[in-house]
Structure formats: C-alpha cells, structure tokens
Image (cartoon, rainbow, N blue to C red):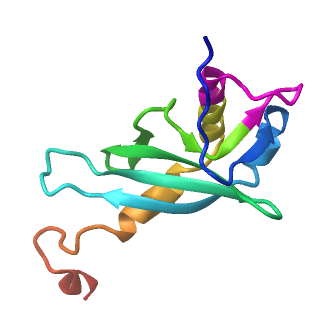
Amino acid sequence: MPTLIKLPEGSVCWPVAALSSAAQDVRHAQTSVHRHRSSERPTAGTTRWERSYADARAWVEWDWVEVGEGTVVQVDPLNVRSNVLLLDDHNRPLLSSRRRATLATLVYLLPWQGPVLDKLRLTEPSHRNGLPAERLAA
C-alpha cells in the first residue's frame, strides 16, 4: 500500500518533467554546521536550497557529514526533506518512494558541496597549530 506524503504548510507543486531545468534555479539558502567537542565525531550539518516563485518558496534540505578534509557527503541520500509535492506527467503526486529517489536526483544535480565547504572554512575554530588567530594573520 502506498505511503501518504506529509508536506509542510506552504508546500508547492513541481512537475517532475521540469526537474532538470528547475535545478538550475535552485539556490543555496543556508547551511548550519555542528562541530562536536570530541574530535572522534565528524563535523556535520544541514544545508537548505530554495527556489522562489511569485507567491511561494520551494525548499529542499538534507544532512551532511565531513568525511575528510575538503570532502562532504550526504548522510542519507534518500532522506531529503522538502515542501515540494512532485507531480507526474498526469499531474498526480508521485508515490513516496519515487519522490525520495527524485529528490535525491535533484540534490545530485546541485553544486551543494562548495557552499557547505565555504561555510566550514568560515566557522573553523580560531586556533590552528596551537597559535591564536591573531598571530596567524600577522
């Protein structure tokens, strides 16, 4: 039996056929970084991308983790949160499993790693190599 899709208030409809062209208009909105005090746990976070319409804003967001210096990956490629209701060629909502796979494809098309890595660089701890940040700038 198909799973019902629960969408946030203010959801928007998006035809699957327009996915590749829509991906060109989706822009980075925000990225949050979660650094753990223990160096044993990797740095992780969430990133959100949006596309504005006349009266609404479509968004997709997902969790990521840093697996090495300069390398970030999605925590779970099939767990993309969104307020987008994807429609098939007959304007019917996609089944939940197909929707997850389609949103994963959208994320694959986005250049999301660059903005996430930029945010990581901006939020680096103020000490490197044991020297205060002021001494590094000198």
Magenta region includes residue 96: yes
Image quarter (top left, top right, bottom left or bottom right) of the N terminus:
top right
- Judge from the rendering whether residue 65 lies leftward or rightward of residue 131; answer left or right: right
Q: Quadrant of residue 2?
A: top right
Image quarter (top left, top right, bottom left or bottom right) of the C terminus:
bottom left
112 lies above or below 32: above
Residue at image x 74%, y 35%?
86
Give percent across and percent down for residue 37: 14, 57
Residue at image x 63%, y 35%?
103
- Residue farthest toward the right in the current orientation of the protein: 90
6 lies above or below 95: below
- Judge from the rendering whether residue 22 lies leftward or rightward of residue 27; answer left or right: right
Give percent across and percent down for residue 46: 43, 52
Look at the image and give the residue range highlighted in magenta.
Answer: 86-101
Give percent across and percent down for residue 123: 33, 68
Q: Quadrant of residue 104?
A: top right
Q: Quadrant of residue 124?
A: bottom left
Q: Nearer the viewer, residue 76 or 10?
A: 10
Residue at image x 36%, y 44%?
65
Q: Nearer the viewer, residue 86 or 22?
A: 86
Give percent across and percent down for residue 14: 78, 41
Q: Nearer the viewer, residue 41 or 136?
A: 41
- Judge from the rendering whether residue 61 lies leftward or rightward of residue 127; answer left or right: right
Magenta region includes residue 55: no
- Judge from the rendering whether residue 73 lies leftward or rightward of residue 92; answer left or right: left
Residue at image x 68%, y 43%?
84
17 lies above or below 110: above
